[in-house]
Structures are given as structure tokens and as C-alpha cells.
Image (cartoon, rainbow, N blue to C red):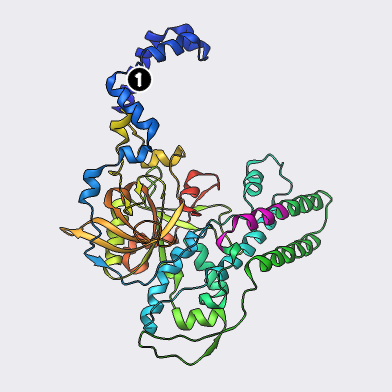
Amino acid sequence: MKMHKIMITVFSLILFCGAQAIKSGSLTRDIIDEIQHDNKLDPDDQLLLNALTNNDIKSITLNHRFISQHNNIFSHTIKTKGITDQESSGRCWLFAVLNTLRPKVIQKYNLNNFEFSQTYLFFWDKLEKANCFLEWIIESANKDLLDRQIDYFLYSPFNDGGYWSYVAELINKYGAVPKEAMPETHNSRNSWPMNDLIARKLREDALILRTMVEEKSPDEELRCVKVDMLKTIYYMMVLNLGEPPKSFVWRYEDVDGKASEPKTYSPLSFYKEVVNVDLKAFVPIMNHPGKEYYKLYTFEYQRNIYETGDPVHINVPIEKMEEWTMKAVLANEPLYFACDIIPDKYKDNGVLSTSIFDYKTLYNVEYELDKGQRIIYRESAGNHAMALIGVDLIDNKPVKWLVEDSHGKDEGHDGYWAMYHDWFCEFVYVVVLPRKYVPANITRILDEKPIIMPPWDPMSWILRNSQ
């Protein structure tokens, strides 16, 4: 019906504008006169002009009726302690996963608070990404520099972005450590200058490796040179982030003030003994209405560790995603989810809802792209990951969700967001669930051969998070 209406409108415009103007394709004086004639401001428009030229758009379009009815009451909340802060870095995906694990450690040891070292896993993620980049450069060295794949590699060789699976693979290989074992540095909190300088070095390395391949250098020589390049990257990272510990002593004090005996751990033994959550036993669920449901998708060149597989996700309808998410949260399972955090958020009250801002009435225009169309036309993309820690149910249906962010207490409502059902449906793309909350016929899809998507497909961008 919508397309039929559009075609009628286009046909009418052709008759009105004239064939010559349409044929030329230029913004002629006649067309400009026509546009201006049809947009003469009436008194109501003049009032809007005065308001918009002197005020912020969001303050004018804010739906005060909706905000006045909003509350921060949730029928079920998972107990957590403390808000983390990734500051000026793109580590949201890393914070979000670790924030789902923190409550388990706090509860297990009866702690006032606990935080993992994000810097420790960030360090290894960066080194692994550098290795992937150099390996992919070697593998594709015979391709033209203007090839789309090479362009993709060179565009962002050392970014902060990531998927849930990145953390699972990193922990499986490197373990984890408490924050005090490898604390934040200025450049872990503000990673962009470090990223730019190391990316500059990696592009220089790419030139060297491509030249070596062109000169028919043997594979053994290429890999030896690559290792020397990684030594330089490692050195630069140590100067920015500190050196990751091979072992450390951890001691804690519980809520009653009782101190534990000091104990020495390796990062792997710490995770196994203190946390012991099998991240491989989780199911990554995504919602992309533009792709076939109940299929497994994977994304080329999106892994962070060369020897592991690229991330996979099962595509399901949003109703199923929300249903399984509700079951897990009601069972006190904090969940990682990925979304487009940019649209329709009200920072002052920490609210996410499509009803907050009334742009339609202000401009008298319709925004009619659906979720799948917004993805394909680059209107929306996954750019942030957070943790789901609560839900507000009325008649056993989710009205809103409690979200723990990782941008400190100044973001949202003291670091939390109230995410309404409508916003969940429109802007949530991924939820990662413990296997027991996903039906067996769905988890079996993980055993199927995935549909391979190129790295520039819009779907790969809705899953990678870096805000």
C-alpha cells in the first residue's frame, strides 16, 4: 500500500514539474522557485521557526506527558553493586560482558563490590587484532589495493569495537584478573590516540608485507617479519596500558569486614576458581527482520583471535528474543545485549523509548523505515552494548527493562537506563542467553552450516559494538 501511494505521488509530481525539469536532473531556478512557493510560512510555521532557531530540537519535541508518567519502578531487579566507566574508549562490549559476571563474584564472596580488569583483556584483544590484521594482509597480498576487502582491512586495523564472542575467546585463552592486578591507565580510558598511532604503524607494516609477497619471499620469512612487527606493537601497548600479569596475589574483604588470606593466581586459574562460568555455553541471538529467521549467520574477518572462528548468531523474531530474555532475567541472569543507543533516548531521566520525542508533529513528516530497512539503508547500526539487570512486568508482559550502562553515574539515571518495550523491539539487535533459556530446536541451529556474510554487510555492523 505504501509503495502504491509513493508511485501515485511521483506520477503527480512528474505532471506538475514538467518533463524537461525532471530530465535535466539539475536544481534549476524554476524548481527552486517552485520549492519556495510551496513552502511559504504561515503564522504557525513562523512560531515554529522562532522556537527552533532559539532552542534545542529535543527540548522542543520532548513528550512531557510521557515523561511525567515514567517511573523507575521494576517488578524484578537483579542485585548488582556499583557502576563502571569505560570513559573515552570503545570498550562497551568488554564492560558489558564483565558486568554480567561481576554479580556472581560479589555474591559468591559476599563482597561490597568487585570489578574485573578491563585493561587486561583489552590488552590481549588489541594484540590479537594486530595479529589478525597482519595475517589477513599476508593472505590477501596479491589483491589490488583498491579491492573492497583490502580497503576494509586498511580502513580500521586497530579499532576498539567488539562482539560478545570476543570476551569468551579472550577469557578462554588468557583468563581474567581483578582490576587491581592491572588497573586502568590514561590510555585505556582514552584509547583513540594510542589506536591512531598503532594503526599508523600497522599500515606501514602492511606495505612491507605486501612488498615481500610481491618479491616472492617464503612464508617462513613473512611470519618471522610479522613476529618482529608484533613485538613492536606489544612494546607500544605496554607503554600505554602496562604489562599484563602472568601471576598475581588476590585478597578481598567481605561485607562484614573479614579479610581473606592472600592467594596467588594465574589469570586462567583465577577465572576458573573464582568465576567458573562457561561462556561457550551461551547462545548469541540476533534480530534482523531483513534476513531469514531461524538461520545461523557468520561474518567474515570479524574475529579477534586468528585461530578461532568468526562470530555466529541465530536470527529470530523479536517476540521470541524478548520472551527468552524475560525468562532469563526473572531467573536472576544478567544478560549482555547490543543495540543502537543513539535514537530516542532522554539522558536527563535515563529513558529509552520511541515515544519520547515527537518529530512528526514538529516537521509534519513521517519516518516510515522499518527495522530491517533502517539496517540495510545504514540508518541504524549496533553501536553499544550494555547489561540487562531487571524488568517491569504488567500482566506478565514486559513494559520496560532495567539496563546497566558502563559510562559512569553521569550517564542515564545514575548510570542506569529504563528501556521501554517499544525501544527494545526497534533498537535491540542482540541478546546473549544461557543455553537453558533457549528452546532446544533453536540451539540446534548452532550445529548447522552458517550463512557467510561479507564484513561490509550492514548486518556485521549491527553486531559489532564500540561506543
Depicted 315 relative to depicted 51: above or below: below
Task: Say which amino acid is labelled 1.
Answer: Met
The residue drawn where x is 28% and y is 52% is 420
Q: Picture coordinates of residue 349 (x, y %)? A: 31, 53
Q: Picture coordinates of residue 428 (x, y %)? A: 37, 51
The residue drawn where x is 55% and y is 47% is 454
Depicted 51 relative to depicted 272: above or below: above
Depicted 423 relative to depicted 116: above or below: above
Front residue of 372/214: it is 372
Q: Is residue 409 visible?
A: yes
Residue sitting farthest toward the bottom: 261
The region drawn magenta spans: 189-201
Judging from the image, what secondary structure is the residue with disc 1 in?
helix
Question: Relative to residue 42, is residue 29 drawn left or right?
Answer: right
Q: Which residue is mark 1?
A: 7
The residue drawn where x is 40% and y is 14% is 36
